[in-house]
Image (cartoon, rainbow, N blue to C red):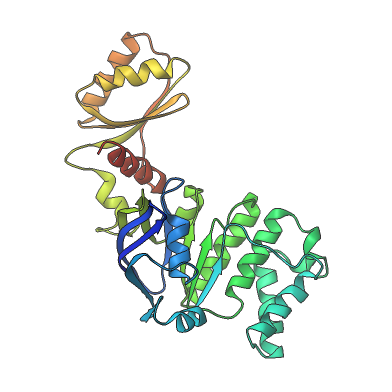
Amino acid sequence: MIACENLTCFYGSFLAVDRLSMEIPKGSICALVGPNGAGKTTTMRMLSTLLRPSRGRASIGGFDVVREPTHVRRLIGYLPEEFRLYTDMSVERYLEFFGRIYSLDSATRHERTVDFLKRLGLYERRKDRVGALSRGMKQRLGVAKSFLHDPDVVFLDEPASGLDPVARTELRDFLKYQQWQGKTVVVSSHVLKELADFCDFLVMINRGQLSEIGPLTGEDGVLARHADTATGGRPYRLTILRDAPKLELAMQKEETVSNIQRRDQTVHFELNGNEEDAAALLGRLAAAGFSIARFAPEEMDLESVYRKVSGEEAGK
């Protein structure tokens, strides 16, 4: 459904996206992840025909984003990270207005407006002015508008921004419903745990280059590939009460430990060994005077893959 070949974008002399080649299958919900400045938004803008690639090519549903932008725009919906709403309209009138712009008939406009507002927890606010909504409610309204015209592909840039836990659950259920309807959705977000709840495909980029791609689960999925590697080992998490910087330095001297990343008082690492090696490491650290609050293996998840791949990239 979405294909890129050597997709490249320069902003002046700055290389934002560097020869990106990938394919995102039809009917998937793809997590597009990477650190700030990795090129996620630039990639979305190129795929959405809002930004012309400097080099390479990309297509949506077989239509080239440069040579056939009108065809592409008929197939897609797009919610940028920063977007504006008509604040003087009521919530339901806002969607009805865009339904007319999309040339939807009256019955279809009304049916989708009611359905989407109910699914996204906005139906009770349908008579309220858009300007009176909270940031999270505006975000959900923007999501509804992106799907209103029944596009085949939808790009969502940070759609969970400003959402509380209940609203995130409603967003998750709404996107799974759209996937069931056959939609392909590309979601960029920093909230990795929420992405893992509803995404089944992963594209990870760093410094404009592809770092990882593939289905999340399954024998050949990204999680399985990173569960254990020849150059690393089983992922662990170690939390101490104090002196985390000293612990990080001590871990760097351990021959069986690799891919060390510290966050506050917790150190994530990989241990190339068995449970006896883990027990021996724990004993050495305790003997060195570290007050250990938690030491346990961790299951490989999207956040673990992100840390692992980011660590590998940083070491290059």
Residue 244 % position (x, y): 42, 19
Residue 215 lies left or right of residue 141; in this view the side is left
Residue 174 % position (x, y): 57, 67
Tell me where residue 228 sits by quadrant.
top left
Residue 262 lies left or right of residue 103; in this view the side is left
Between 6 and 196, which is closer to the camera in this rendering? 6
Q: Residue at x 32, y 41 (%)?
A: 308
In which quadrant of the rendered image does the N terminus lie? Answer: bottom left
Residue 62 % position (x, y): 35, 81
Residue 219 to residue 193: above or below: below
Q: Residue at x 29, y 15 (%)?
A: 283
Between 243 and 80, which is closer to the camera in this rendering? 80
Between 276 and 57, which is closer to the camera in this rendering? 57
Q: Residue at x 67, y 76 (%)?
A: 115
Q: How many marks?
A: 0
Tell me where residue 217 sits by quadrant.
bottom left
Looking at this view, name the residue that lies furthest to the front: 12
Residue 126 to residue 109: above or below: above
Residue 53 % position (x, y): 39, 66
Q: Residue at x 43, y 58 (%)?
A: 31
User: Can residue 3 be seen from the camera position used here?
Assistant: no
User: Can residue 97 be seen from the camera position used here?
Assistant: yes
In which quadrant of the rendered image does the C terminus lie? Answer: top left
